[in-house]
Image (cartoon, rainbow, N blue to C red):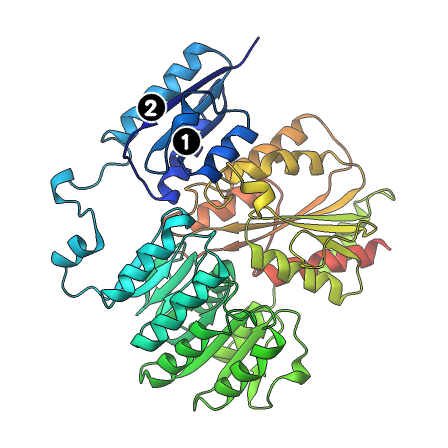
Amino acid sequence: MMSEIINEIRKGFYLDSVALMRLSAEIAGLGGIEEAVLMIGTPANLQIMTDAGILNDTGATASPNDLVIALRADGKSSANRALALAQKSLEGGALASSPADTQPRTLRGALAGNYSANLALISTPGAYAGREARQALELGLNVMIFSDNVSIAQETSLKMQAREQGLLVMGPDCGTAYINGVPLAFANAVAPGSTGVIAASGTGLQEFSVLLTRLGGGLKHGIGVGGRDLSNAVGAISTLTAIDLLAADDQVDQLVLISKPPGPATANVVFEKLASCGKPVIACVFGADASSLPASINYAATLREAAEMTTGNTLPADNPVHNAPELAANLNSRQQKTLGLYTGGTLCTEAMLVLQKHGLSVSSNATASGDNTQAMHRIIDLGADEYTIGRPHPMIEPAVRTPLLTDALNNSEIAIVLLDLVLGYGAHDNPVESIATAIAQVEDNGKADKPVVIASICGTENDPQDYHQQKEILLNAGVIICDSNSDAAELAAAVVKAIS
């Protein structure tokens, strides 16, 4: 049977990327739908839909000011049903907010109704994000750029302008922030407190903040600077501004930096400024040589260690590493490999580094140097471009992980499957469902040599999802839950060593 492809264009219609990804995921979950994408009609997005085989002649006429609904279904009936749901949602159903006549159409219009606002969150296609961010700066607003695909040259220009005006630019590609304890974008419901964080990583900031809350600490600010800010090209402009802001805030008593190693030309400037800020500093810089940091800066190798150093407390010593020999004994001689399937890029990197610390050969798409195809173990960032082009991010739609998880559970050479679960605002309502379903299907098939599944949950009891229910579902499915992402990777390494 031939697939049915339907495209519809909404002229002059715009929604931010997160709302569109959520609606795309909802429609894709309908019976008979093979692919569903709602995107603004930029040239780049039209190419994505073309490559996915879901753009027809109608959709190809869309302009960057239009919204494209592109569907591929097993028949006309399924396609029409999905199109009707999309139309209903866009016309005032699932995505309705305030009446149209009260919605400001411009930044100036929004400010006219809210004179106290001092921050603009920009979530537009990357081609327009720079323009909107610059207008926000000209209006005297600090800026958080959620959008990606903003050039380094434009990022640097915006941040230089912000510095000249005494303002701050967070991002581009800034998915998480906390200002005065208020969560922005993808974030968890964490405890308020006196810690100030500067992070070049969204899930890194989330994991640290969650662990900080569990340890009795709290967050005052979590400033996301974007993954490129500490590069030599950008020069850590926002990071340096953030250090000044946190150092001057009387309600912040210590600073934490979370990032990959800064560019060589940038590192000295950043660490010298941190060392002289007048407050205790903890640096969790993945892959960095601790001996290269100033003696006055405390170095943490993992996010758990950073949270424990910040609070002076430790998580309960119940990580089941001591069970590694027992877990290994249940595996057969062919099961030697580890596969990590991660929705959080920084959590992926942290797991890879923990395994490498134990002398394991690991490949990953999260490394700048490329994959080592001879490596026994593999850790995958499912939020990377090769997995998300034309599809929702796995934090929004975790079912993206399901085919890879199912294959891993049925692979007789895999000993360990490592997973992360990220809860919080913006994340999927029930991220464990697809995992539990995949495991149950393998159980039903009677497979004997099942791998050990190890996971950690980045979430708090106050997150929109029911933390305890999510954990219980995983435990009932036979998943081993660790207190933190680094603990999960430590357990995986211990099982591998016990096997050998």
Question: In the picture shown, does residue 320 fall above or below 106?
Answer: below
The foreground one among 43 and 103 is: 43
Report the side of 312 relative to 380 (left or right).
Answer: left
Report the side of 492 relative to 23 (left or right).
Answer: right
Confirm or deny contact between disc 1 and disc 2 (CB under 8 A): yes
Report the side of 162 relative to 205 (left or right).
Answer: left
Q: Amino acid at mark 1?
A: Glu
Of the 4 image quadrants, the one containing the C terminus is: bottom right
Q: Is residue 219 visible?
A: no
Q: Which mark is residue 26?
A: 1
The foreground one among 48 and 370 is: 48
**Around disc 1, counting alpha carbons within 10 Å, would you say few (fewer than 14), some (14 to 19), or many (20 or more)?**
some
Of the 4 image quadrants, the one containing the N terminus is: top right
How many numbered marks have been drawn onto this rendered protein structure?
2
Residue at 38 percent across and 34 percent down: it is: 23
The residue pinned by badge 2 equals 85
Q: Which mark is residue 7?
A: none
The foreground one among 32 and 11 is: 11
Residue at 48 percent across and 57 percent down: it is: 151
Secondary structure under tag 2 reads helix
Question: Residue 181 is drawn in which quadrant?
Answer: bottom left
Question: Residue 116 is drawn in which quadrant?
Answer: bottom left
The foreground one among 493 and 45 is: 45
Q: CA distance from mark 1 to mark 2?
A: 9 Å
Q: Amino acid at mark 2?
A: Leu
Question: In the picture shown, does residue 351 fall above or below 181?
Answer: above
Q: Is residue 111 visible?
A: yes
Q: Where in the figure is residue 49, as x and y percent of width and height? A: 50, 31
Q: Where in the figure is residue 310, as x and y percent of width and height? A: 49, 78
Q: Where in the figure is residue 330, as x and y percent of width and height? A: 79, 45
Mark 1 or mark 2: which comes first in sequence? Answer: 1
